């Protein structure tokens, strides 16, 4: 089913494309010409590296007519019980940047009930304009009314770019809206920028379990939609003197016509799941005993993170297996992994080396963990951890 | 009761490694597997069948070898399995995939509930489920971790959805499309009887021609609003380790916290 | 000639692989370290159909073939020997033997619950003074009315302390016992709970520490005459035919152990660096890896051929013995090399290979020691030994009738 076209006359058998293909879809046949199989995803990685231009993909057709009517950058401001999450302000911050690059305005969409204060916050964080849809039907997030309202607004106002946070609600909503509008949607982006030549939104995201990055565009449909991962973009500082326009929209929603009702909300108490934890503080042989995990727990608590452990600590019976990180334990990929008294055996590294930032605290300056850490402190964890906990407490105002 | 499960064959991304020298993916020996999240979708559908009777149909879109995952679904207990495979579907993004699957589902006849995994581990978008729901104009319930109540006669369903802050309990109407998370169940292994049945069964392959009434312009690359323009390997973990020095541990701690805050991870 | 697994076999292999990875792997280190047998594995194996895998559905089994039995053993021992031992004893030695020799009544009463996994069977041949030298058995069965009275001591019996039913071999002809004429030995189905029968667990084993091995003591145990398996005096032939199935599962399991050593060694050789390169780049490491790859392929071909012969209903004592001898030696050598490749890490239980090494030794000793198999192979080659047809042969696999309920 491959879409890649290979000009066999041109192919010189250099294998550059074979090496470049992230999916293993290309190989050389007995005549040393490139051939492609079904694994091809038409990503174009090979087209760029071919020295003789023997490879091509179907041309992106000329932009559809009328795209120039679409103007402005939109952000959906997610809120829960009248409180907007930090992810929304990160979107506003990024949206501001994109709007400035496109020399256009930034619009925040605030949907909910009794949420006018959020509209003002959105302006403070950088929106030029807020479309406020305040209605009892919108009190709780539900796909149908939220999608219906946004689809109507998009059809009426025609934004060029629309970004949402990649939260569970954001992904739920974006998928529904993009389908209805018939436009492209890129999930879970970690990078957004404007192509200076085409003015298109370049949306970069990890794929293949984070093993590769892909940049995606949406050339012929509008708005260009993307969801963005939490904590990827900087949270802007609010400026409460900023002025902006608030447009109030009456959605004409009928509660009776909506099949879905939110009937309860069960808050999760207690434990942080290791695999989902954003921050993990881990202890190894160096903690010396079960009580050695106390300073680790305290630091994890201040950071709102989970407690991990090396196999050595688990085997010694200092902490249950559920905490084990590594080849025989959990594989984790947090934003921050703090390894305390862990030497860094291969099977431990296998379970955590894709963490975004790794901090190693160890007495032994030769410990292998320092080779893969971003930051290291050579020292006694029983002195370093309390100091670190105190410092975080101060800085995070806890 | 008729439940439909949408499943996908994916490369086992946990087996993928990066060649440290060339910076490319090492794909030798990377097996193609049933998307792990989809096994929970199959399991939940089978549990409904055990409780209410009826049948479960598995459907997948992909190259001919994707039949393998349909066999797995049948071995677990699905009654029927259909593969959508055609050159015309090549290059589909999530929009075109959702469109094509929804066209096939329409052709399957009446159904009560559709299950999808929360996302596929190769694309990780989670968009196809909502896409199918919108195409079919049915209710979508994403990230479901528990079906609290279901009544096919009255068309009622009440589920728990696993969100960042906790579990939201939602009531809706059937037919509905559910995307499920791992917490919902523990998938069964294929039984030996199921394996025998799966290995002896015929698997219909539907092409674009079979999807009567569909608009061919919405298939494959033509029906895909997005284009991948560049694929690259993320920069490898830098070998640079910054050792934080200081006169006292307090000073070291302060410096480290400063740097971590600057990294915007806390 | 077909060297490819069927779809059915491939799916079964994958299913058992996942079963072992999910149900056995997570706890095996702890169980092995504490010398604990987990009886909780029985219901899980039963539910999956493993405990009656190659028994027809009408006898409560899963209706798969003998190759499936081998593949399941390979996948289970890939994770740990203890799980494969359950298959060897309960399916290979006990259930298959009832299937081969039992009367319809015995099959209904004993095979059906065993194949469904409701009861666990064990095999009581070995005694303190009778291992390879079977005719040195001391256990006796004295006829008294409609019962036999069993007396004696069995040891090195896998699952002794956890099984419900036992296949016990004992002399019924004391004159032949004195003359060491094995046609005086008979086989009995004995139930736990009958007066005079007690079992015990053996501690301090080198390997298979997560498995149960023990002894059976019989002190005037009354066994109903209808529990005689086969005819009086057929016990030796029954025991030897049972070993054809037992040894087959051991061979297949040892093949899985070789693969486990190979996979662990390859993984480590790619990760571990010395002299600035992964150790896999060193030629002497490569040699050990090459041997493991070679041994795995040979062992697998040998056991699959034996399984194929069983499916066809062709006598396979010779081929099964060769597969067992080769695979167990090869597994031990591979495990030793795997420890060597892992260096000091291989010497401690940080990695699995030290357990593989300890587990690999047992199979070189039991179910026909290495030496017994060497003698057998020599005798076959020299023409001193040939197999005569048995009164009851193991039924050939029939895909149609085996799936009729």
Image (spheres, coloured by chain):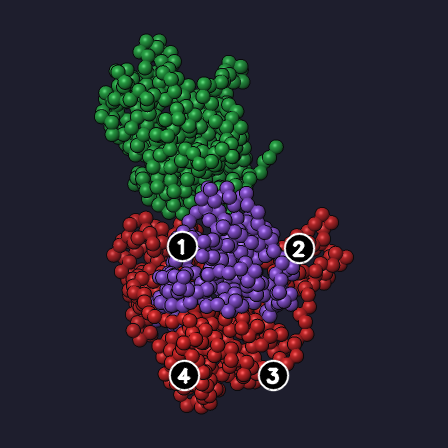
Badge number at residue B52: 1
Quarter of the picture holding the N terminus of chain B: bottom left
Q: Position of residue C404 (x, y in %)?
A: 47, 36
Q: Secondary structure at mark 1?
A: helix
- Please state which of residues C107 and C279 is positioned toward the viewer in this rendering: C107
SS category of the residue bearing label 2: strand
Foreground mark, 2 or 4, reads 4
* Alpha-carbon span between mark 1 and mark 2: 47 Å
Q: Is residue A227 above or below residue A253?
A: above
* Viewer-nearest of discs 1 and 2: 1
Look at mark 3 in the image and give the residue it sits on: A69
Circle number at residue C197: none
Q: Color used for chain C?
A: green
Q: Which chain is red?
A: A
Picture coordinates of residue B62, whole percent (x, y)? 58, 56
Numbered disc in front, either 4 or 1: 1
Residue B46 placement, left or right of C202: right
- Foreground tag (3 vs 2): 3
Q: Residue at x 53, y 60 (%)?
A: B109
Contact (CB < 8 A) between labels 3 and 1?
no
User: In this rendering, is residue B25 above or below C290?
Assistant: below
Cα distance in 3D space between marks 4 and 1: 42 Å
Q: Earlier in the sequence, mark 3 or mark 4?
A: 3
Residue A36 is marked as 2
Whether marks 3 and 4 lie on the same chain: yes
| Image-quadrant location for residue C207 | top left
């Amino acid at each position: 089913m491959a879409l890649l076209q290979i000009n066999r006359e041109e192919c010189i058998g250099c294998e550059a494309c074979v090496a470049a293909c992230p999916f293993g879809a290309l190989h050389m046949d007995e005549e040393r010409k490139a051939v492609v199989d079904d694994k091809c995803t038409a990503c174009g990685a090979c087209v760029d590296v071919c020295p003789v231009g023997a490879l091509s993909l179907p041309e992106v057709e000329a932009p559809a007519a009328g795209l120039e009517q679409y103007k402005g950058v939109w952000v959906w401001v997610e809120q829960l019980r009248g409180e907007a999450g930090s992810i929304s302000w990160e979107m506003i911050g990024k949206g501001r940047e994109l709007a400035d690059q496109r020399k256009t305005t930034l619009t925040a969409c605030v949907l909910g009930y009794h949420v006018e204060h959020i509209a003002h916050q959105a302006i403070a964080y950088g929106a030029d304009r807020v479309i406020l849809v305040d209605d009892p039907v919108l009190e709780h997030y539900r796909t149908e009314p939220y999608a219906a309202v946004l689809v109507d607004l998009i059809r009426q106002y025609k934004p060029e770019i629309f970004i949402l946070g990649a939260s569970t609600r954001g992904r739920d909503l974006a998928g529904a809206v993009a389908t209805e509008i018939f436009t492209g949607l890129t999930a879970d982006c970690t990078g957004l920028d404007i192509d200076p030549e085409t003015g298109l939104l370049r949306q970069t995201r990890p794929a293949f379990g984070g093993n590769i990055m892909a940049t995606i565009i949406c050339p012929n449909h509008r708005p260009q939609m993307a969801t963005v991962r939490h904590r990827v973009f900087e949270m802007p500082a609010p400026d409460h003197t900023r002025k902006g326009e608030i447009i109030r929209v009456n959605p004409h929603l009928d509660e009776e016509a909506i099949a879905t009702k939110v009937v309860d909300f069960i808050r999760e108490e207690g434990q942080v799941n290791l695999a989902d934890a954003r921050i993990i503080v881990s202890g190894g042989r160096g903690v010396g005993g079960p009580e050695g995990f106390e300073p680790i727990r305290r630091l994890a608590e201040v950071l709102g993170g989970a407690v991990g452990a090396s196999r050595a600590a688990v085997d010694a019976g200092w902490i249950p297996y559920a905490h084990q990180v590594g080849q025989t334990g959990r594989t984790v990929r947090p934003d921050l992994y703090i390894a305390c008294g862990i030497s860094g055996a291969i099977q431990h590294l296998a379970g955590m080396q894709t963490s975004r930032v790794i901090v190693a605290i160890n007495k032994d300056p030769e410990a292998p963990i320092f080779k893969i850490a971003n930051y290291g402190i050579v020292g006694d964890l029983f002195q370093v951890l309390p100091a670190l906990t105190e410092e975080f407490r101060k800085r995070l105002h806890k | 009761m008729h439940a439909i499960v949408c499943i996908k064959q994916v490369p086992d991304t946990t087996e993928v490694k990066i060649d440290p020298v060339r910076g490319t993916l090492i794909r030798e020996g990377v097996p193609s597997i049933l998307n792990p999240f989809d096994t929970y979708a199959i399991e939940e559908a089978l549990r409904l069948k055990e409780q209410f009777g009826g049948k479960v149909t598995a459907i997948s879109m992909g190259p001919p070898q994707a039949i393998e995952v349909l066999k797995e679904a049948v071995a677990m207990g699905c009654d029927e399995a259909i593969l959508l495979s055609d050159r015309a579907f090549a290059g589909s993004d999530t929009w075109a995939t959702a469109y094509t699957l929804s066209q096939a589902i329409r052709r399957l006849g009446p159904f009560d509930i559709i299950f999808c995994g929360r996302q596929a581990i190769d694309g990780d978008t989670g968009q196809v489920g909502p896409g199918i729901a919108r195409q079919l104009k049915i209710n979508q319930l994403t990230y479901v971790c528990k079906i609290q109540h279901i009544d096919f006669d009255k068309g009622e369903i009440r589920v728990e959805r696993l969100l960042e802050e906790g579990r939201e309990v939602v009531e809706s109407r059937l037919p509905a499309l559910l995307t499920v998370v791992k917490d919902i169940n523990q998938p069964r292994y294929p039984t030996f009887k199921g394996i025998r049945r799966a290995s002896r069964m015929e698997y219909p392959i539907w092409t674009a021609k079979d999807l009567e009434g569909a608009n061919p312009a919405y298939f494959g690359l033509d029906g895909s609003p997005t284009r991948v323009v560049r694929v690259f390997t993320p920069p490898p973990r830098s070998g640079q380790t910054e050792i934080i020095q200081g006169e006292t541990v307090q000073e070291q701690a302060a410096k480290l916290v400063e740097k971590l805050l600057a990294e915007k991870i806390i | 000639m077909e060297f490819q697994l069927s779809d059915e076999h491939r799916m079964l292999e994958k299913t058992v692989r996942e079963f072992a990875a999910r149900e056995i792997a997570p706890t095996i280190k702890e169980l092995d370290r504490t010398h604990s047998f987990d009886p909780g594995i029985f219901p899980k194996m039963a539910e999956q159909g493993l405990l009656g895998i190659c028994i027809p559905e009408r006898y409560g089994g899963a209706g798969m073939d003998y190759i499936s039995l081998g593949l399941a053993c390979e996948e289970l021992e890939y994770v740990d020997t203890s799980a494969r031992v359950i298959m060897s004893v309960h399916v290979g030695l006990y259930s298959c033997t009832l299937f081969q020799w039992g009367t319809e009544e015995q099959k209904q009463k004993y095979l059906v619950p065993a194949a469904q996994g409701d009861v666990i069977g064990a095999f009581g041949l070995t005694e303190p003074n009778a291992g390879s030298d079977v005719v040195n058995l001391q256990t006796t069965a004295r006829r008294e009315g409609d019962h036999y009275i069993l007396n004696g001591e069995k040891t090195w019996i896998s699952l002794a302390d956890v099984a419900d039913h036992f296949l016990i071999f004992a002399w019924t002809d004391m004159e032949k016992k004195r003359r060491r004429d094995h046609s005086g030995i008979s086989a009995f189905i004995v139930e736990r709970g009958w007066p005079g029968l007690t079992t015990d667990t053996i501690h301090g084993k080198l390997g298979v520490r997560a498995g149960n091995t023990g002894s059976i003591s019989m002190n005037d145990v009354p066994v109903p005459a209808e529990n005689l398996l086969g005819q009086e005096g057929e016990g030796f032939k029954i025991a030897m035919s049972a070993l054809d199935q037992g040894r087959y599962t051991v061979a297949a399991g040892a093949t899985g152990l070789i693969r486990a050593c190979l996979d662990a060694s390859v993984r480590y050789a790619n990760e571990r660096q010395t002299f600035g390169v992964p150790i896999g780049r060193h030629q002497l490491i490569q040699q050990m890896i090459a041997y493991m790859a070679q041994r795995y392929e040979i062992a697998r071909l040998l056991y699959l051929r034996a399984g194929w012969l069983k499916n066809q209903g062709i006598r396979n004592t010779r081929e099964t013995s060769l597969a067992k001898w080769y695979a167990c030696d090869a597994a031990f050598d591979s495990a030793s090399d795997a420890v060597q490749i892992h260096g000091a890490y291989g010497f401690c239980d940080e990695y699995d290979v030290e357990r593989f090494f300890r587990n690999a030794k047992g199979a070189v000793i039991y179910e026909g020691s290495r030496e017994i198999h060497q003698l057998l192979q020599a005798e076959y080659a020299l023409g001193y030994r040939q197999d005569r047809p048995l009164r009851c042969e193991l039924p050939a696999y029939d895909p149609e009738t085996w799936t009729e309920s």
